[in-house]
Protein backbone atom coordinates (compact mmCIF):
# COMPACT_ATOMS: atom_id res chain seq x y z
CA UNK A 1 0.00 0.00 0.00
CA UNK A 2 1.50 3.31 -1.11
CA UNK A 3 1.13 6.20 1.30
CA UNK A 4 1.91 9.88 0.74
CA UNK A 5 2.26 12.49 3.47
CA UNK A 6 2.63 16.23 2.97
CA UNK A 7 4.61 18.34 5.42
CA UNK A 8 5.66 21.97 5.68
CA UNK A 9 4.74 25.33 7.16
CA UNK A 10 1.08 26.16 7.43
CA UNK A 11 1.68 29.91 7.23
CA UNK A 12 3.81 31.76 4.71
CA UNK A 13 4.26 35.50 4.35
CA UNK A 14 3.56 37.24 1.03
CA UNK A 15 6.54 37.41 -1.35
CA UNK A 16 8.22 34.47 0.38
CA UNK A 17 8.72 30.96 -0.99
CA UNK A 18 6.33 28.18 -0.05
CA UNK A 19 8.11 24.86 0.46
CA UNK A 20 6.32 21.54 0.99
CA UNK A 21 7.64 17.99 1.11
CA UNK A 22 5.82 14.78 0.24
CA UNK A 23 7.16 11.66 1.91
CA UNK A 24 6.29 8.42 0.14
CA UNK A 25 6.15 5.00 1.76
CA UNK A 26 5.24 1.61 0.36
CA UNK A 27 6.80 2.32 -3.01
CA UNK A 28 9.80 4.04 -4.56
CA UNK A 29 9.52 7.37 -6.38
CA UNK A 30 12.02 6.00 -8.94
CA UNK A 31 9.84 3.06 -9.94
CA UNK A 32 8.90 3.02 -13.65
CA UNK A 33 6.59 4.68 -14.78
CA UNK A 34 4.96 6.81 -12.13
CA UNK A 35 4.38 10.55 -11.96
CA UNK A 36 4.52 12.35 -8.62
CA UNK A 37 2.30 15.40 -8.53
CA UNK A 38 1.44 18.50 -6.58
CA UNK A 39 -2.16 19.68 -6.69
CA UNK A 40 -3.92 22.40 -4.72
CA UNK A 41 -7.44 23.51 -3.91
CA UNK A 42 -8.04 27.15 -2.99
CA UNK A 43 -11.00 27.84 -0.72
CA UNK A 44 -14.27 27.60 -2.58
CA UNK A 45 -12.57 26.55 -5.83
CA UNK A 46 -11.74 23.38 -7.70
CA UNK A 47 -8.56 21.36 -7.84
CA UNK A 48 -5.61 22.93 -9.63
CA UNK A 49 -2.68 20.91 -10.93
CA UNK A 50 0.72 22.46 -10.16
CA UNK A 51 3.21 20.03 -11.68
CA UNK A 52 5.00 16.71 -11.41
CA UNK A 53 8.36 15.03 -11.15
CA UNK A 54 8.47 11.65 -12.79
CA UNK A 55 10.28 8.37 -12.10
CA UNK A 56 13.35 9.56 -14.03
CA UNK A 57 13.51 12.98 -12.33
CA UNK A 58 12.02 14.93 -15.22
CA UNK A 59 9.62 17.72 -14.33
CA UNK A 60 6.62 19.37 -15.97
CA UNK A 61 4.71 22.36 -14.64
CA UNK A 62 1.38 24.04 -15.17
CA UNK A 63 1.88 26.87 -17.67
CA UNK A 64 0.11 29.30 -15.34
CA UNK A 65 2.51 28.57 -12.45
CA UNK A 66 5.65 27.55 -14.31
CA UNK A 67 7.57 30.77 -13.68
CA UNK A 68 7.23 30.37 -9.90
CA UNK A 69 7.37 26.58 -9.48
CA UNK A 70 10.16 24.11 -8.84
CA UNK A 71 9.73 20.43 -7.97
CA UNK A 72 12.72 18.36 -6.89
CA UNK A 73 13.32 15.03 -5.19
CA UNK A 74 15.55 13.27 -2.67
CA UNK A 75 15.66 9.63 -3.66
CA UNK A 76 17.58 8.66 -0.52
CA UNK A 77 14.62 9.79 1.57
CA UNK A 78 11.94 8.85 -0.99
CA UNK A 79 10.62 12.41 -0.92
CA UNK A 80 9.74 15.08 -3.43
CA UNK A 81 9.47 18.77 -2.73
CA UNK A 82 7.46 21.71 -4.05
CA UNK A 83 8.79 25.23 -4.01
CA UNK A 84 6.48 28.07 -5.06
CA UNK A 85 8.09 31.47 -5.05
CA UNK A 86 6.72 35.00 -4.64
CA UNK A 87 3.52 33.81 -3.03
CA UNK A 88 0.44 36.01 -2.60
CA UNK A 89 -2.79 35.43 -0.67
CA UNK A 90 -4.17 33.84 -3.87
CA UNK A 91 -1.81 30.92 -3.22
CA UNK A 92 -3.71 30.08 -0.05
CA UNK A 93 -5.00 26.53 -0.51
CA UNK A 94 -4.97 22.95 0.64
CA UNK A 95 -1.96 21.38 -1.05
CA UNK A 96 -1.95 17.70 -2.00
CA UNK A 97 0.66 15.32 -3.34
CA UNK A 98 -0.57 12.46 -5.48
CA UNK A 99 0.69 9.65 -7.69
CA UNK A 100 -0.40 9.09 -11.26
CA UNK A 101 0.38 5.96 -13.32
CA UNK A 102 0.32 8.01 -16.54
CA UNK A 103 1.17 11.65 -17.35
CA UNK A 104 -1.83 13.58 -15.99
CA UNK A 105 -3.84 16.25 -17.76
CA UNK A 106 -3.42 19.88 -16.73
CA UNK A 107 -7.12 19.84 -15.85
CA UNK A 108 -7.33 17.66 -12.77
CA UNK A 109 -9.31 14.46 -13.25
CA UNK A 110 -9.22 12.57 -9.97
CA UNK A 111 -9.52 9.26 -11.83
CA UNK A 112 -6.02 9.83 -13.18
CA UNK A 113 -4.51 9.51 -9.69
CA UNK A 114 -4.31 6.32 -7.68
CA UNK A 115 -2.86 7.55 -4.38
CA UNK A 116 -3.20 10.89 -2.58
CA UNK A 117 -1.85 12.47 0.54
CA UNK A 118 -4.32 13.80 3.09
CA UNK A 119 -3.54 17.39 2.15
CA UNK A 120 -2.04 20.26 4.10
CA UNK A 121 -3.45 23.76 4.54
CA UNK A 122 -1.14 26.60 3.55
CA UNK A 123 -2.20 30.16 4.28
CA UNK A 124 -0.39 33.14 2.80
CA UNK A 125 -0.77 36.11 5.10
CA UNK A 126 1.32 38.75 6.78
Image (spheres, grey):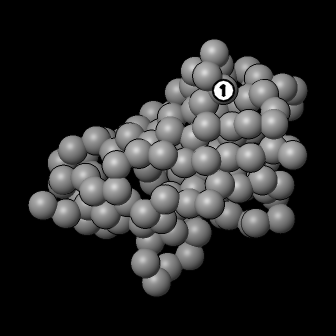
- Where 107 falls versus 85 (above or below)? below
User: Which residue does the numbered mark 1 point to in the structure image?
Assistant: 78
Number of residues whose C-alpha sits closer than 10 Å to that of mark 1, classed few (under 14), some (14–19) or many (20 or more): some
Q: What residue is rendered at 84% in x and 26% in y?
A: 31
Count of labels shown?
A: 1
Position of 61 with respect to 55 (left or right) is left
Relative vertical location of residue 113 with respect to residue 31 in this rendering, above or below: below
> Is residue 76 shown above or below 31?
above
Residue at (49% x, 79% y) in the render: 45
Seen as rendered, the residue at the extreme top is 76
Q: Is residue 94 left or right of residue 3?
A: left
Say left or right for 71 vs 87.
right
Q: Quadrant of the C terminus?
A: bottom left
Rendered residue at 34%/49% (across/down)? 9
Residue 1 visible in this rendered orientation of the protein: yes
Q: Circle 1 sits in a helix, a strand or a loop, which is it? A: loop
Picture quarter containing residue 77?
top right
Residue 13 image point, x, y percent: 18, 53
Q: Residue 87 in the image: state x and y as whole percent.
A: 27, 52
Quadrant in which residue 55 is drawn: top right
Say which residue appears at 44% left-offset and 71% top-offset: 42
Asked whether the viewer can see residue 84, the reply is no
Residue 3: give x, y in percent of width and height: 74, 46
The front one of 79 and 104 is 79
Amino acid sequence: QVQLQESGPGLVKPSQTLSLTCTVSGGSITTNYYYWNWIRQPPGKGLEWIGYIDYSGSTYYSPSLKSRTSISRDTSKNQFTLQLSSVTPEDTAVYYCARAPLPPDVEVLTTQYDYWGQGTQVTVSS
